[in-house]
Amino acid sequence: MADDFHYLSLDEVARRLKARKLSSVEATQAMLDRIASLDPKLKSYATVTPERALADAKRLDAETAAGKSRGALHGVPIAVKDLCDTEGVPTAAGMAIRRDHVPAKDATVVTRLKQAGAVILGKLQMTEGAYGLHHPSIDPPINPFNAAYWTGVSSSGSGVATAAGLCFASLGSDTGGSIRFPSTMNGLSGLKPTWGRVSRAGVFPLAESLDHVGPMCRSALDCAIVLGVIAGADPSDPTAVPQPVPDYAGAIDGGVKGKRIGMPNNLIGADADCQRALDGASAALQRQGAQLVDVTLPDLDEATVQWLAQCGVEAALAHESTFPSRRAEYGAEFAALLDLGRGLSGLELSRMQRTRARVTGEIDRLLASIDLLLLPAIAVAAPSLAAMRARTPQTVASRLRYTAPLDMSGHPALTLPGGMTADSVPAGFQIVGRRFDEGAILAAGHAFQQATDWHMRRPSA
């Protein structure tokens, strides 16, 4: 096995498996060996399932030998965030109160991954209930680029494992930025699809009207492959929209020629690394034929502040059976969110809904005048762990400014690596598209990655 095998793209591994230049058992064992070697330090996995993964890989190799292929992921080892139900495997959602929860059936997204031939290596660590901090009983994952820096939340394990070569792709979830933050901090391509594009059946909720499930990968192409597998209507989730699922990977070479890409003229708080990533992205996309358009963002601050209350009230509903009756088993920060949600009045709820409708309409109107929008993923490109300990409503809102409003509006967004800081930590940016136009942002991301190599940067040994 080549020294850099673990850093191959999902697409390349799938092609080698299809050509029988590699077996699923070989790929899976290599991943399991690497997890055993590195993850005691990185702490990205909540649960590893080696016996099940190798048994699945062996069965898939037998199918390959018989001329059968399940699809785009046949034999590829991946992992999923630990809020996706997996039959017979503990699924704790980062919570002490759920550490003994063993689902009787798979989440729809897990079923679809398996149907497409994926080998599930295990469940990836996450923050408590998919909110802002890890439960006090859990050791947080470590950023493989620089241990002094944030990993992003809440899909922290998904970001770390995929970046460190402990799986070839992963699933995350995004309620306020939880695919995009860890993708940015770990140098990944992370896609928050349109709300309703991917089923949430069997995925433990933080806030159901804000939750999105999506891929975290090493390239836009890999995201396109995984999204094509997990997207689509689902009888078990009436909010999964019954629109046809395009061939995202097949259309990935669509490029950006003639596309009108908005560059905001009123960004707030963007640091030098963040601005360099945006400027580099805009220049690269312009060289690929895009037309840059100066645009003014709507006021996002009110929506960002109110996101916290919206998240809190929906989380309180999700935890109604155990909170506050089992408060002692919750971490202090998550308990505070649930208290906030339980204390809201009807007037406050109505005010939140009015703000949400306004910001959704304004983003729709902005995107009607352009094809795509460039945004920071986070204004401070690479926050340190020390900086992230300063948690007040104001600091939290400032970090969520460019992510949470898109969870409220439901628009799709693709985060891509676009630079490195002086401390060798990735810096990223977002491409935002119209509702259900994931194909356009994936094609734009692929065009950017064909012209740059930021997505090829790996953690040092």
Image (cartoon, rainbow, N blue to C red):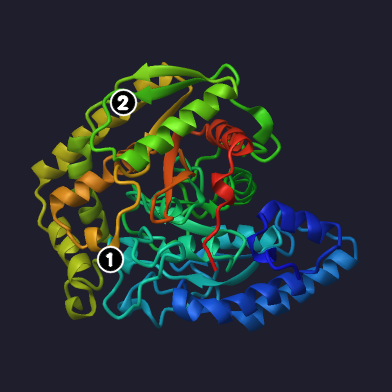
Please report the residue visible at 18 percent of the width from the left and 76 percent of the height from the top.
327
Residue type (three-letter) at the residue carrying disc 1: Leu
Q: Is residue 262 above or below residue 450?
A: above
Residue 375 location in percent, x, y?
A: 38, 34
Q: Give the number of the disc on residue 133.
A: 1
Q: Tell me how far mark 1 sits from mark 2, CA to CA.
A: 31 Å
Local SS, label 2 = helix
Q: Quadrant of the N terminus?
A: bottom right
Residue type (three-letter) at the residue carrying disc 2: Gly
Q: Give the number of the disc on residue 361.
A: 2
Q: Is residue 411 visible?
A: no
Q: Is residue 3 above or below residue 354?
A: below
Q: Quadrant of residue 402?
A: top left
Q: Quadrant of residue 252?
A: top right
Q: Quadrant of residue 346?
A: top left
Residue 420 location in percent, x, y?
A: 44, 48
Q: Is residue 173 visible?
A: yes
Foreground mark, 1 or 2? 1
